[in-house]
Image (spheres, rainbow, N blue to C red):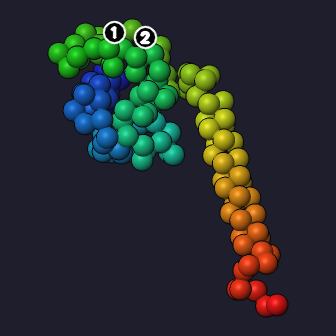
Amino acid sequence: MTQTEWDRILVSAFYRNLNAPMWVLFRDDSVLQGLKRVPFVHQFSMPVSRFVSGYLPKLGSVLWASALKDTDRIVAALANSKIDTLSVDPRARPETKERMAQRKQLASDTLAICGLAAHHAKCRRSSWTTCK
């Protein structure tokens, strides 16, 4: 498989089914050698739209702004570009870390509130669930 064929498969899959996982696009594992814009092992289960938007941000912005009829023009432009999976948008990692930190803090706060409410319910004088 050549780079142009892979680019055509990637662009057409983006327009056909945004939620299709990346592993659907491959027929054989041997075709991955030497190609650019190919997912890593842990990225095979993510949808095509998420892979293109997160790991190929320049291509993603072009695909979201274009229509299906521009596929040939986009593939021709990709033949001369140096966009690769390794050139990840630097905002992707810090944003992910910040989102995970916020999720962890929210879970911690929720547990603290629930624990405090359970403690107050157990220690109230009007609570007959405790032994007196």
Left or right: where 106 falls relative to 120: left
Mark 2, Cα crowd under 10 Å, few <14 / some 14-19 / many 20+, is: few
Label 1: which secondary element? helix
In the structure shown, which secondary structural element does the residue marked by tag 2 occupy? Answer: loop
Q: Nearer the viewer, residue 47 or 40?
A: 47
Taking the spot 44% from the left edge, 27% from the top edge, the residue there is 53
Q: Which mark is residue 77?
A: 1
Three-letter residue code for mark 2: Ser
Residue occupying the point 61% across, 23% down: 91
In what quadrant of the picture does the C terminus appear? bottom right
Quick one: 72 or 91, which is closer to the camera?
91
- Note whether 100 is above or below 78 in the view shown: below
| Spot occupied by residue 112 in the image (x, y as percentages of width and height) | 74, 58
List the residue tagged with mark 2. 81
Label 1 neighbourhood size at 10 Å, few (<14), some (14-19), many (20+)? few
For the residues labelled 1 and 2, say whether their Cβ atoms are less than 8 Å apart: yes
Q: Amino acid at mark 1?
A: Ala
Above/below status of 72 relative to 95: above
